[in-house]
Image (tube, rainbow, N blue to C red):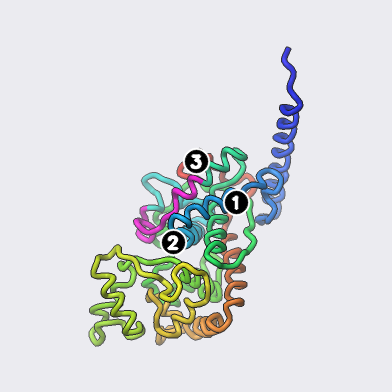
Amino acid sequence: MEYATRGDRTASCLSFLCKIVVLLGLAAAAASGQLMDDYYDYCCPQVYRIVRSRVAAAMKAEMRMGASLLRLHFHDCFVNGCDASILLDGTNSEKFAAPNNNSVRGYEVIDAIKADLESACPGVVSCADIVALAAKYGVLLSGGPDYDVLLGRRDGLVANQTGANSNLPSPFDSISVITARFKDVGLNATDVVVLSGAHTIGRSRCLLFSNRLANFSATNSVDPTLDSSLASSLQQVCRGGADQLAALDVNSADAFDNHYYQNLLANKGLLASDQGLVSSSGDPAVAATKALVQAYSANGQRFSCDFGNSMVKMGNISPLTGSAGQIRKNCRAVN
């Protein structure tokens, strides 16, 4: 007859307790329908260290990855809610929707984080929570605010390529259309301006703004709301093709700050949807968005605070909690 060692008994006890805590957490989440800031404190407290370490390594290799992980979270939450559906492979994959194909990135970073967490605490941390935490550290390690991420999401079972094509705001949309898309998921005009400020970091392909650089209209070759010196420099960049990259924030592409808003007031917004926050004549939504742009341009601390609040709101778009969905073992496929 074999006897368990003290270490075996301790590990077994801790495993049992962890299961009890998870079950209690699921019950609490199901009852309240809300996410919690201490969801993994007992069963996987190392989740924060593991996610931060992997994001830091990815950003050391390529600083732009912080912005990419932030965008990945945004594009996930606007389709089916924040359920990691964007990570699923297959014929209906959201990865191949027009707004995401050859554009959204960071999947390999999420895979690496998931592998580490499955080794540390198997079957506990959802892919949806990993995406939310990776976005947080992408912001923080770019110099942005350290906001609390609410956790306890579970992973969705289906991707929604059609929804990704129709629900995600486009850089070609008017501010009124974008505001309506945000309203559809429970976000308001303030969230539009605040979350657009994520463009203080990262880069965009010429495909998404080259229409502003030539043959813009019958009366203007170049978009008149685009600073002429910036237009000239972008024309040079985009001669290399539609996939060439330009900084979304011409002053500090890798630093999370309020220069983005200052750029808009100087007609230096890269995307039409960015510049539209202050320059869209005849759009009734712009009066409100312009006032906020002016406020954030003058007060970076206010922007940082509001950004954290809006990220928490966005992260709470239709999360799966309780017994809904599952905890995927592989973020690219259902169990």
Q: Position of residue 159 (x, y in %)?
A: 45, 49
Which residue has dot 2 on it? 64
Which residue has dot 3 on it? 330
Residue type beneath disc 3: Asn
| Mark before the other along the chain sequence, 2 or 3 | 2
Q: Is residue 157 left or right of residue 164?
A: right
Is 103 magenta? The answer is: yes
Which is in the foreground here, disc 2 or disc 3? 2
Residue 153 is tagged as 1
Residue 285 is tagged as none
| Mark before the other along the chain sequence, 2 or 1 | 2
Q: Alpha carbon of mark 3 to alpha carbon of mark 1: how far?
A: 16 Å
Q: Position of residue 247 (x, y in %)?
A: 39, 70
Residue type beneath disc 1: Arg
Quadrant assignment, res 187: bottom right
Q: Which residues are magenta?
A: 96-112
Under circle 3, the secondary element is loop
Q: Residues within 10 Å of mark 2 (few under 14, many from 20)?
A: some
Q: Alpha carbon of mark 2 to alpha carbon of mark 1: how far?
A: 26 Å
* Between 8 and 59, the one nearer to me in the picture: 59
Under circle 1, the secondary element is loop
Quadrant (top left/top right/bottom left/bottom right) for the N terminus:
top right
Q: Position of residue 87 (x, y in %)?
A: 46, 49
